[in-house]
Image (spheres, rainbow, N blue to C red):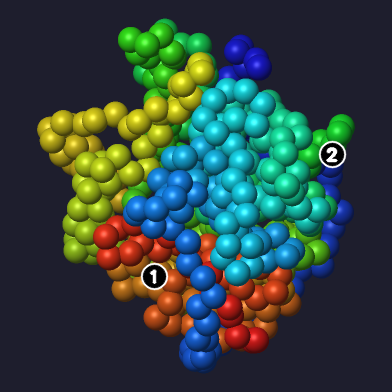
Amino acid sequence: MSGTRPRALLLAALAAGLAAAPAAHAQQTVRLPEEDRALALRPTPVFAVGTAEGRAWEMFSRVEQVAFDRADNLYVLDGGGNRVVVFDRAGKFVRQFGKKGGGPGEFQMPVGMTVQGDGTVAVADLAARSYSLFSPDGRYLRSVAFLDDYMPMAIGGSFSSHPRGGVVTAVRPAPPMTMDGRMRRETLQATPIVWQPFAAGAQPVRMFNAPTEINTQTQASEPSRGERQVAFRMTIPMFTPRVNWGMLPGGDLVVTHTPGYTLKVMRDGQPVRYIQRPMRERRVTEADRERARERRREAMRSGEGVRVISIGPGGGGPPPRRSPEQIEQSIRDMEFAETIPAIQNLRVDGAGRIWVERTGEEWGEPGPIDVVAPDGRYLGTVTGQKLPAAFSASGRAAYLEKDDMGVERVVVRQLPRL
């Protein structure tokens, strides 16, 4: 790691220099119809896993990500349990691997996971600053360090497998691990989406550079147990468009990051197709702001979305407790964008279809889902359903849900043929 170069310059270098100069590609614009066409989609339940009481493998403490392999086996990254739990296509428990710790095959703060085409499982560990690779049977293979002074951002598409191997994710400068305890503030002007191959000697490739403006605060401290902890906070005005992306089967990237309804299909760092729909962002109302404040208040009370990175054998720690006064001050400090974007999420299924979740009547609630073919053809709109968290190649979908008691579970359903 370099402790002398400004991170703003590092980010610019990453944006400009990871990939070779791309070849020019012809650009196409596909305009989708304004009126919705209802798509009858009634998924058939297959199985569900996750319970409040039972055997150890049945109880999840924080599901970070789910994925399927080519045989429809389901992989669940239980971040709170520091493990990966595997179920077969009928929902029967197969194995689990990983545990809390700093040794080979152990996790300190797992935040993302992919299953590669050959069955290799890659788990991203923020505290270890590396991907841990496992064989299909759960045997630890090796670790691949994060890109220089950067680490993945668990946003948008989170972690996606590239068809040619490796992980695609957004990155940001990693918080420094040696600080004097003072607050460090920086502004990020871009969010690069980077393909990190796992093959020996392969170089990372910048696939897209999303213009953003994110204010960050980093502060290190020494708790009584002797481990250095780093508190990192990103300040983004509420309702700012998220950077959402997915990988198409041929290796193209589909990404959305603007307030309006525009999907960009990227190849070799250049747009080859724009998919647009005449739907615009809407103005933020005071009711929108008040709902956002209440959600933030509840999240801060529960510690949801807060991570503590510890450098040492302890790994990640519990979120810090905040007093009611601190919570209310944070609520008063909230900033808001002027508009609410038309799109709030995006996924790509095993056939390369793009599932675009539009913003519902209330920000953060499930909205209508447009299903678009890889070439931009509009297939229809699904209503009254959540966006799946993962798809299998055979047409299954995994949904992250909570039961009536608030217990996390993963529900697998078979999608009808589209």
Task: Tell me where residue 226 appears, x and y as whole percent.
Answer: 41, 9
- Is the residue 43 above or below the residue 283 in the image? below
- Is the residue 381 above or below the residue 1 in the image? below
Q: Which residue is tagged 1?
A: 366
Quadrant placement of the N terminus: top right
Task: Tell me where residue 101 appears, x and y as whole percent.
Answer: 54, 25
Q: Residue at x 75, y 31 (%)?
A: 142
Left-right relation of 360 to 142: left
- Is the residue 109 above or below the residue 193 in the image? above
Quadrant placement of the C terminus: bottom right
At mark 1, the secondary structure is loop
At mark 2, the secondary structure is loop
Task: Tell me where residue 377 appears, x and y as whole percent.
Answer: 67, 83
Left-right relation of 83 to 321: right
The label on residue 199 is 2
How packed mark 2 is, by other alpha carbons closer than 10 Å (few <14, some 14-19, many 20 or more), is: few
Q: Are marks 1 and 2 in contact (CB under 8 Å)?
A: no
Q: Which amino acid does label 1 sit on?
A: Pro
Q: Residue at x 70, y 74 (%)?
A: 394
Q: Who is closer to the viewer here, 316 or 158? A: 316
